[in-house]
Amino acid sequence: GVMLDVGHSGTDFRFATARKLFDQGFLPTTISTDLNIFNVDHPVISLPETMSKVWALGVPLSEVIAMATTNPARVVHREDQLGSLADGREADISVLRIVEGESLLSDGLEVLKAARRLVPIGCARAGAWIAAA
């Protein structure tokens, strides 16, 4: 089958195009970013910001989380090691907060009003806590 990835960068993810695809049932398999020094301030910002954009376009939060965790692990054939919390797996955990209230999300051209967004709090990596900047 065909797998689709958001792969948000500065110019290759547009809300208008995503809406058309999502409305026809073509949802991304995975959510990722092409985060770099040219788009870290705008429009990509972070993976949770990109997840918030897909969520704001109507994809249920549980599916958005799978698109950033279990689905990528499956795509790279490492679902037995990565992508979920289970006995014997690496327990690298991102902690995100749902922030309620209107916020503006940008794809680089269009601005989308969202009722809520995901904000990183920190992560547990190799047994150490790393707070979000």
Image (cartoon, rainbow, N blue to C red):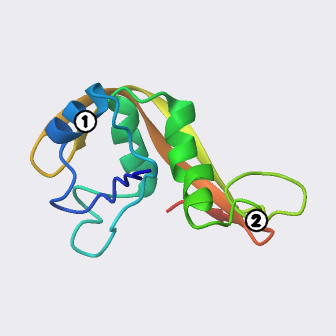
Q: Residue at x 19, y 62 (%)?
A: 10
State yes or no: discs 1 and 2 in contact (Cβ < 8 Å).
no
Residue positioned most to the right: 87
**Label tally:** 2
In the image, farthest residue toward the bottom: 37
> In front: 62, or 74?
74
The residue labelled by disc 2 is: 81
Locate residue 62, reporting x and y percent: 57, 33
Q: Residues within 10 Å of mark 2 (few under 14, many from 20)?
A: some
- Helix, strand or loop at mark 1: helix
Q: Which mark is residue 21?
A: 1
Position of 83 with respect to 1 (left or right) is right
Q: Which amino acid type corresponds to the residue marked 1 in the rendered image?
A: Leu
The residue sitting at 67% across, 56% down in the picture is: 83
Residue 46 screen position, x and y as percent: 39, 58
Please state which amino acid type lies under the numbered disc 2: Gln
Identify the image quadrant of residue 73: bottom right
Is 78 situated left or right of 52 in this image? Answer: right
Label 1 to label 2: alpha-carbon separation = 31 Å
Q: Position of residue 59 (x, y in %)?
A: 42, 30
Q: Out of 117 and 89, give the one closest to the viewer.
A: 89
Is 129 positioned to the left or the right of 118 in the image?
Answer: right
Tell me which residue sits at (43%, 55%) in the image: 47
| Residue positioned most to the left | 109
Q: Is residue 62 above or below residue 70?
A: above
- From what the image shows, is residue 102 above or below residue 50? above
> Quick one: 43 or 24, which is closer to the camera?
24
